[in-house]
Amino acid sequence: NPDALIVGTLVSLYDVGAVFGATGAAFTAEYLGRKQALIAGTVVLMIGTILMGSAFGRAQFIVARLFTGIGIGYISSVTPVYQAEISKATHRGWHVCCQLTMLLFGLMIAYWM
C-alpha cells in the first residue's frame, strides 16, 4: 500500500520518460530514418510493457514506467513527421491530428484505469 507520494512518482515517471524519449528522437531519428526510428521506439515500448506486466517489486515497476515513457515519447515524436512525409497533401493535417487525438485519448483511458 504505497502512500500518495510514491503513487504520484510512479505515475509521473511515464511522462519523465516521454520527455527523454522525445529528446532522444530529436537527435537520433534523422540518422536512423523514420521507419527504423519507429521500430526502435516500439521495441523500447514493448520491453517496458513486458517489464511492467511482470513487475514484482517497486524498482522493476519504476524502470518499466521509464521504459514505456521513453518508447512512447520516441514514437510520438517520429510518427507525425513520418505521416506528414507519406500522406497526400490534402489529408496530411487530418492524419496528424487524428494520430495526436488518439494518442491523448489512449493516455486518458490509461490514466482512468
Image (spheres, grey):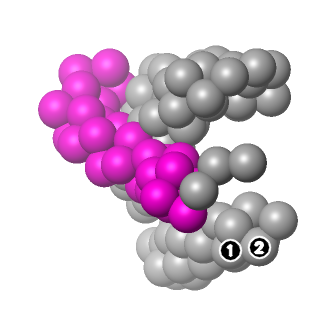
Determine whether the residue tagged by mark 2 lies in a helix, strand or loop: helix
Residue visible at 69% across and 67% down?
111
Name which quarter of the figure residue 59 lies in: top right
Badge 1 amino acid: Met
Q: Where in the figure is residue 54, as x and y percent of width and height?
A: 80, 20
Please report contact status of discs 2 and 1: CB closer than 8 Å, yes or no.
yes
Residue visible at 61% across and 29% down?
58
- The kind of secondary structure the magenta stretch mainly shows is helix
Q: Is residue 56 above or below residue 107?
A: above
Q: Is residue 63 visible?
A: yes
As drawn, the label of residue 108 is 1
Q: Few, some or many C-alpha atoms within 10 Å of disc 2 (few <14, some 14-19, many ≥20)?
A: few
In the picture, measured across the screen, residue 6 lies left or right of residue 50, that is: left
Of residues 89 and 4, the one nearer the viewer is: 4
Name which quarter of the figure residue 28 lies in: top left
As drawn, the label of residue 112 is 2
